Amino acid sequence: MPIVLSGTISDEKLFESEIRANGRDFQYYLRLGRTFDYPKAKEMAELAIEQRNVTALQALAQLQPIATSEAISSQDGVHLIAKSAHEGNVAAPLLFFQLRHQIRGQYRQKFRELARATIIHSALRISGRGLRPETIKTVPFYPGLDEFDLDATLEETLLEPDYVNYNEIVGVERVARKKIGTIILDTSGSMAGTKLLTAATAAAVAAYHLRHDKYALVAFNTVASIIKTIDQPTTIDTIVDTILDTEPAGYTNIADALKTAFTQYQRVHRQESWAILITDGIANRGGPPEPHARKYHNLHVLQTPGTHPQGEETCQQIAQLGRGRYIKVNSYTEIPRALMRLLRQT
């Protein structure tokens, strides 16, 4: 519980006391530490590492990234973030995103590995094995087959009703239907920080769930880029590393995203192919996205939280023109699970 102090106390002393108490939220530390210079921020970061106060460390990383990176680039810093990663705490990837331009050498690589491990662990927990649509096909019966088609078997045995052999029994096999789709991720400036972490987790969820299928992955900000083509074999580690290195800069060019993604989407001539666009819908570069949405069938839109009504209107219109579903989430932490629900329905 927070420490109660009487009399006049400086922000520095109060910050130090609350680090030791470890009972405040991110915004509280951010407000108290806004006037810290480099030496004071480094001192407080070292204390936060000693007291295992990750929340205070994240606030200091935002206020004084260079000082915090100096403090955390140590064995004690690595041990703290490793412990947080093991517990499923998102501190590892969040601190990596905050400090990746300041941390150097072996420590940068170590924090990157911990960030990747946390994201993948979270994605596996969300994905599980997943429920997959099935196709049913008839095959000659063989020992061990659980099902057979009674009507088809009766038709086969009408001429010899007194005797039935294996060759005349029509067996049924259930086969998980292969999926073919494209994930389109917004990594623009409005997606920085926690939002970029969510994008990385969503990409990992998709990569794990679709690991035996054909899928493409496209990321976009001012322009769009293909992270994975529809036929390209790759690993979840590689995909997460690519997102970890993504700069959440620039504007939001949904038109180019849909145009680029369509180069992958159209390579598969199947009615059941699909695409999922994850964005806040604020298209401020590249012109209107609606003409590109009309080319799709099964273009689903997962709208991330936003306050501008235009974003919601754009997302709804894209889904309608693309003949897909529209889902809106209220917080960024809901995105990976919402994506999982969409993937199970495709």
Image (tube, rainbow, N blue to C red):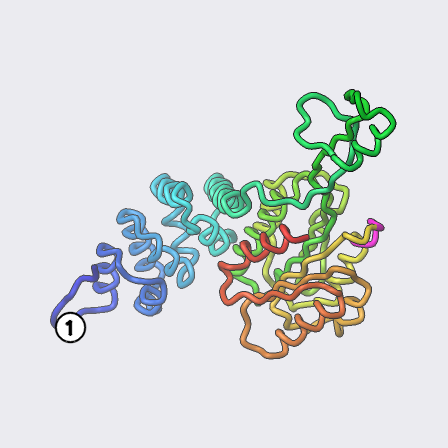
Residue 62 picture location, percent across and down: 42, 61
Image location (x, y in percent) of residue 183: 68, 54
The spot of residue 174 in percent (x, y) is 70, 37
Q: Residue at x 51, y 51 (%)?
A: 100
Magenta segment range?
Answer: 265-269
Task: Answer whether residue 88 is visible to the viewer in this image.
Answer: yes
Is residue 268 covered in magenta? yes
Taking the spot 41% from the left edge, 49% from the top edge, the residue there is 89
Quarter of the image where the N terminus is located: bottom left
For the point 15% across and 65% down, which residue is it?
A: 4
Q: Please say if 92 is above or below 293.
A: above
Q: Is residue 162 above or below residue 216?
A: above
Foreground pick, 230 / 149 = 149
Nearest the eye: 318 or 166:
166
Asked which quadrant contains residue 251, the reply is bottom right
Tell me: 303 left or right of 138. left
Count of marks, rendered view: 1
Taking the image as shown, residue 340 lies to the left or right of residue 268, namely left
Residue bearing mark 1: 8
Q: Who is closer to the viewer here, 106 or 84?
A: 84
**Residue type for callout 1:** Thr
